[in-house]
Amino acid sequence: MALLERHRPILYKIVNAYAHAPSDRDDLAAEAVAALWSAFPRYDASRRFSTWMYRVVLNVAISFARSERRRSERQVLPGALAGLDRAAAAPAEDERVERLAAVVADFGELDKALVLLYLDGEPYDTIASIVGLSETNVATKLSRLKRRIKEQLERDDAVAEGDERGTR
């Protein structure tokens, strides 16, 4: 319980990225805690708890997202990265986080997990072990995802700029 409490932000970050309705977040958090609890006897204490926790919670979240998608095809809401710590964020920073969240919300489960881990500052070798890819594959995918995010944000800026010019 102490380890779970210490690494609780990991749980909420993933839950907020994969479940958007408050009731879904509660359900996913409960499923993830249950999975952590039942898998804990297999935890290898020679490895970082946070890495193991990421892997377990991401697997639960990806399964949850797939089952939710099958149940109903619904639009992913912006704010998927609401779990990022924004307590002391300035309004401009909040806007940047929301814009990033809106772009990442359209990503698939694996891509969303990669971005989440990258934004959390995890090294590529740790990300690779969590998601089950090679380190080279992680680096390649992240490079492409960063480019995709940058291009989408630039397109959004161009559209917004065009809208401002049209209303003057």
Image (spheres, helix red, strand yellow):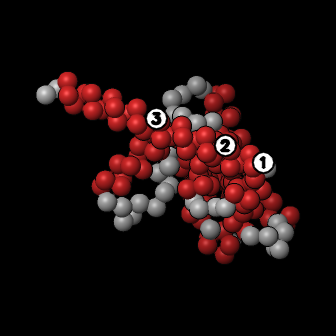
Indicate the quadrant where residue 53 lies. Answer: bottom right
Identify the residue position indicated by label 3 in the image: 152
Q: Residue at x 78, y 48 (%)?
A: 133
Identify the residue position indicated by label 1 in the image: 133
Q: Amino acid at mark 2?
A: Lys
- The C terminus - image quarter: top left
Q: Amino acid at mark 3?
A: Gln
Residue 141: x and y in percent read 66, 43
Work out how far the residue at label 2 is from the one at label 1, CA to CA, in angstroms. Answer: 10 Å
Indicate the quadrant where residue 117 lies. Answer: bottom right
Q: Residue at x 31, y 60 (%)?
A: 90
Mark toward the start of the polypeptide (2 vs 3): 2
Q: Are marks 2 and 1 in contact (CB under 8 Å)?
A: yes
Residue 78: x and y in percent read 45, 39
Could you classify mark 3 by the number of other residues whose Cα lies within 10 Å: few (under 14), some (14-19), or many (20 or more)? Answer: some
Work out how far the residue at label 3 is from the one at label 1, CA to CA, in angstroms. Answer: 25 Å
Q: Nearer the viewer, residue 22 or 167?
A: 167
